[in-house]
Amino acid sequence: MSVKNIRLEVMQFLEKNIDSFVQNYLIPVEKIWQPSDLLPNSQSENFFEEVTELREYAKELPYDFWVVLVGDTITEEALPTYESWLMEVEGVKQKEGEDGTGNGWAKWIRHWTGEENRHGDLLNKYLYLSGRVNMREVEITTHHLLNDGFDPGTDQDPYKNFVFTSFQELATYVSHNRVSQLAKKYGDHKLSKICRIIAGDEMRHHHAYSDFVERIFQVDPSEMMKAFYYMMKKKITMPANLIRESGGAMGDAFVHFSESAQRIGVYTSTDYVDILNKLIKRWEIDKITNLTDEAEKARDYLMRLPDRMLKLAERMKVSEESYIFKWVNPATLR
């Protein structure tokens, strides 16, 4: 049997438990928070007072903080690209059966998308109300990112895709959680709560995708190990790696955005290594048995990789000067 057919069998095997995955890792629509729960109530007589309060708190936040918050928002707003990418994974069928609603994996992706969609919606509204950023420039960058697409290098391979999503959801948790901590430090408790709640969603999603990988290791350990090796050797591509400003070239803003994140400690190169270590520990890579010779070599590479990457991370230099984005004018923050 071909590797592709085995993957399809494994996806069908996992699909039998898709309802339990949805129940365990996602929250019903009627129970989960919505953006309006965390923003000024536009139907309230106190709406303008609440907006004024939000804007006053926002005045204390520094330049690099706003750059990172905008970048995180744009990343969340590019959700349509991520959904369309996941819908192309082997084993996912958008339409199946008499009702044409798709198979179990399509159900998972749509429910996951529903939860993720609230993040960009909430952060976008916060940025708009804060009055601290150039919303038209932010919107242009988001539009470009959607137009430019996204290629995580996973092809249609579900194993590689689940490694990517396991890693990326945890990275997103780290970023939103750190932004929450910084907002609290600067006295903006409302923004801190917003980012903390979004981070909570990302952690749940991380656990879901990590569970998928864990179950694949149980039934197809060698191919799953090789997929993990492949993704880490090529390095995980961040969803915003093609980010650009108006008039700019594809991807030219990503390095500057990353430097802002590193300068204020929101997401650093050592965080990348830490996430890799967490995945190795979560999936108990050192204890997996019944591997082929090729998979054993892949495991050896993975076990040595964190130390090698940490040495590189420690030598990395980040510019001390902030790049001036069109999204945020430092003069308007004074």
Image (tube, rainbow, N blue to C red):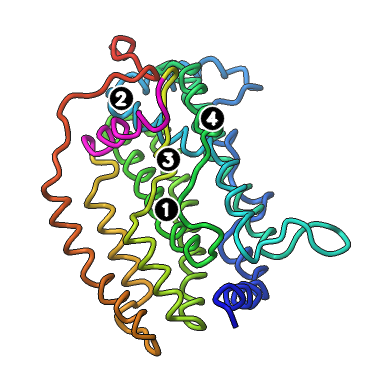
Q: Amino acid at mark 4?
A: Leu
Image position of 290 with respect to 235: above or below: below
Q: Disc 3 designates what residue? A: 195
Point out the frontmost of discs 2 and 4: 2
The span shown in magenta is 248-264
Q: Earlier in the sequence, mark 1 or mark 4?
A: 4
- Whole-percent x, y for residue 303 in the image: 25, 72
Cβ–Cβ under 8 Å for marks 3 and 2: no
Q: Residue at x 42, y 39 (%)?
A: 240
Q: Is residue 64 left or right of residue 37?
A: left
Q: Disc 2 designates what residue? A: 61
Cβ–Cβ under 8 Å for marks 1 and 4: no
Q: Disc 4 designates what residue? A: 39
Q: Residue at x 11, y 47 (%)?
A: 315
Q: Earlier in the sequence, mark 3 or mark 1?
A: 1
Separation (CA) of disc 4 from disc 3: 12 Å
Q: Amino acid at mark 3?
A: Cys
Query: Is-magenta flag for residue 32?
Result: no
